Amino acid sequence: MLDTTQSDPATPSEERRGCLFALSQPPLMIFLAVIGCLLLMASLHDLLLL
């Protein structure tokens, strides 16, 4: 007979972490804030000064 008492080997031992975990990392948020500020400054420059 086939032994079915063992756990499924395909399931990962660690819990998967999604996008919210990645966004909670400070270096990523600093990088996104800098890029956002640069885009905001460029758009305001185009709108107000040109």
Image (cartoon, rainbow, N blue to C red):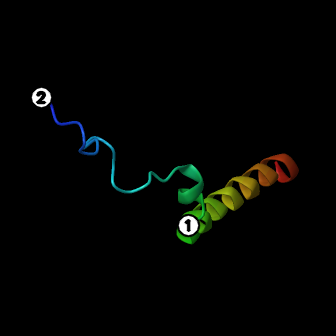
In the picture provided, is 48 more to the left or to the right than 35?
A: right
SS label for mark 2 = loop
Is 38 above or below relative to 9? below
Q: Residue at x 17, y 36 (%)?
A: 3
Q: How many marks?
A: 2
Q: Residue at x 84, y 47 (%)?
A: 47
In the picture provided, is 17 more to the left or to the right than 45?
A: left
Residue 24 is situated, as x and y percent measured from the top left of the image, at: 60, 64
> Farthest residue in the left direction?
1
Q: Residue at x 61, y 68 (%)?
A: 30
> Farthest residue in the bottom direction?
26
Q: Badge 2 is on which residue? A: 1
Residue 34 is situated, as x and y percent measured from the top left of the image, at: 63, 64
SS label for mark 1 = loop
Answer with the quarter of the image where residue 6 lies: top left
What numbered label is drawn on residue 25?
1
Quarter of the image that includes the N terminus: top left
Residue 45 is situated, as x and y percent measured from the top left of the image, at: 79, 54
Along the viewing direction, whichever of 46 and 30 lies nearer the viewer: 30
Of badges 2 and 1, nearer the viewer stands 2
> Farthest residue in the front direction?
1
Sequence order check: which comes first, mark 2 or mark 1?
A: 2
Task: Say which amino acid is labelled 2.
Answer: Met
What numbered label is drawn on residue 33?
none
Task: Say which amino acid is labelled 1.
Answer: Gln
For disc 1, the neighbor class at 10 Å (few under 14, some 14 to 19, many from 20) is few
Residue 5 is situated, as x and y percent measured from the top left of the image, at: 25, 42
Q: CA distance from mark 2 to mark 1?
A: 49 Å
